[in-house]
Amino acid sequence: MKTTKEGKAMMIPTETDAFHKEQRNKELKRNKLERKVREVGILKKGPKQINLEQIRKLDKSTCLHILQENKAERGTPVAKQLTRAEKDAIFRSVVPIQKGRRFGVGSIPFDEEVGQSSYKKTSEDLSRQFSEIKEQIKELKNQLKEVAFWCNKMAQLYPNLVPPS
């Protein structure tokens, strides 16, 4: 049993302890990002006055500054709150993609190039390639039928002709 300098017994960390600690850190980080998104929902202007392109152009410091100003205005009417789609767009613009994944859960769909959407894109690409190959096979079969037809026609026209070997 290991002890500290003071003589107290020290618990040896196990793999499961490290795993749970890592999971907890991820959960805290995800909760922090979700909290930021909820706070971004109350911007100074209503959703009709500011469009998504302007929101995407805002940097993090500007968003946080606006949030701090608007934190006092808790009683904002529903008309000035952002829709779920606008919140998701802000979340996607603020939260970085790490290791092919984006932190956050809920109704936020993944981008085309990451996560499950990449599977969808790959599936669509494969189905498109499959249909192209199918068309090529059909075309080659038609050409083969034409070659067989002309071989039979030549054999009927010139029955004594021996093909070269």
Image (cartoon, rainbow, N blue to C red):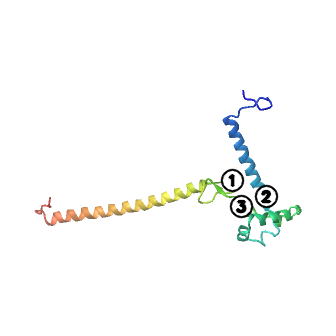
Between 102 and 157, the one lying in front of the other is 102
The answer, for residue 82, to whether it is visible in the render is no
Mark closer to the chain start, 2 or 3: 2
Q: Label 3: few (<14), some or many (≥20) within 10 Å?
A: some
- Tell me: 122 left or right of 92: left
Q: Give the answer, above or below, for where 51 lies relative to 95.
A: below
Amino acid tagged 3 = Val
Look at mark 2 in the image and give the residue it sits on: 38
Amino acid tagged 2 = Arg
From the image, state whether disc 2 or disc 3 is nearer to you: 3
Q: Which mark is residue 94?
A: 3
Q: Position of residue 146 (x, y in %)?
A: 27, 65
Between 5 and 106, the one lying in front of the other is 5
Q: Quadrant of the C terminus?
A: bottom left
At x 18%, y 65%, the residue is 154
The answer, for residue 121, to whether it is visible in the render is yes
**Looking at the image, which residue sits at the far left?**
160
Q: Position of residue 61 (x, y in %)?
A: 77, 64
Q: Secondary structure at mark 2?
A: helix
Q: Which mark is residue 103?
A: 1
Q: Which mark is residue 126?
A: none
Amino acid tagged 1 = Phe
Total marks shown come to 3
- Tell me: 137 left or right of 124: left
CA separation in Å, label 2 and label 1: 15 Å
Q: Label 1: few (<14), some or many (≥20) within 10 Å?
A: some
At x 71%, y 32%, the residue is 12
CA separation in Å, label 1 and label 3: 11 Å
